[in-house]
């Protein structure tokens, strides 16, 4: 048995018949598209996708940021006019 990671779902048949109706019915909420009662893919809004990608970027960037902040005390102050 597969876990469905959305509170809404629709069958692939219903989705193929009218994707726009499925999107309208879901509103901005994500939903799973099921094939043989198993999740095949998820549909999310562009806003949610943007939020998720920003969160992923933050998570992936954290180690680099922490490493660079650790070197901050060794940094030398430079006046841009001197460059």
Image (cartoon, helix red, strand yellow):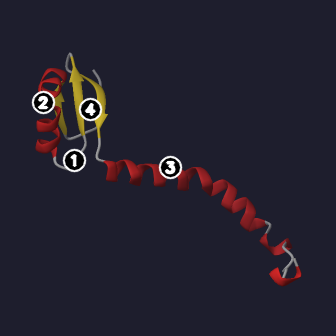
Label 2 – label 3 distance at C-alpha = 32 Å
Which numbered disc flags the more N-terminal residue, 1 or 2?
2
Image quadrant holding the C terminus, namely bottom right
* Residue at mark 1: 29
Quarter where residue 63 is shown: bottom right
Q: Residues within 10 Å of mark 2 (few under 14, many from 20)?
A: few
Secondary structure at numbered mark 4: loop
Q: Are marks 4 and 1 in contact (CB under 8 Å)?
A: no
* Residue at mark 3: 56
Label 4 – label 3 distance at C-alpha = 21 Å
Classify 27 as above or below 78.
Answer: above
Classify 2 as above or below 25.
Answer: above
Label 4 – label 1 distance at C-alpha = 14 Å
| Horizontal relation, residue 45 to residue 52: left or right | left
> Residue at the location (13% across, 44% down)?
24
Per the rendering, the mark at residue 5 is none
Secondary structure at numbered mark 1: loop
> Residue at the location (67% across, 61% down)?
65
Q: Residues within 10 Å of mark 4 (few under 14, many from 20)?
A: some
Which numbered disc flags the more N-terminal residue, 2 or 4?
4
Per the rendering, the mark at residue 18 is 2
* Residue at mark 4: 4
Judging depth in this view, the residue of 48 and 82 nearest the camera is 82
Judging depth in this view, the residue of 17 and 32 nearest the camera is 17
| Position of residue 31 measured from the top left corner of the image (x, y, whole percent) | 23, 38
């Amino acid at each position: 048995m597969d876990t469905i990671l959305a509170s809404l779902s629709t069958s692939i048949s219903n989705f193929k018949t009218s994707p726009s109706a499925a999107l309208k019915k879901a509103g901005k909420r994500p939903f799973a598209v099921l094939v043989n009662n198993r999740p095949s893919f998820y549909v999310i809004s562009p806003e949610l996708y943007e939020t998720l990608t920003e969160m992923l970027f933050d998570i992936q960037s954290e180690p680099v940021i922490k490493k660079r902040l650790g070197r901050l005390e060794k940094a030398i102050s430079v006046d841009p006019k001197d460059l």
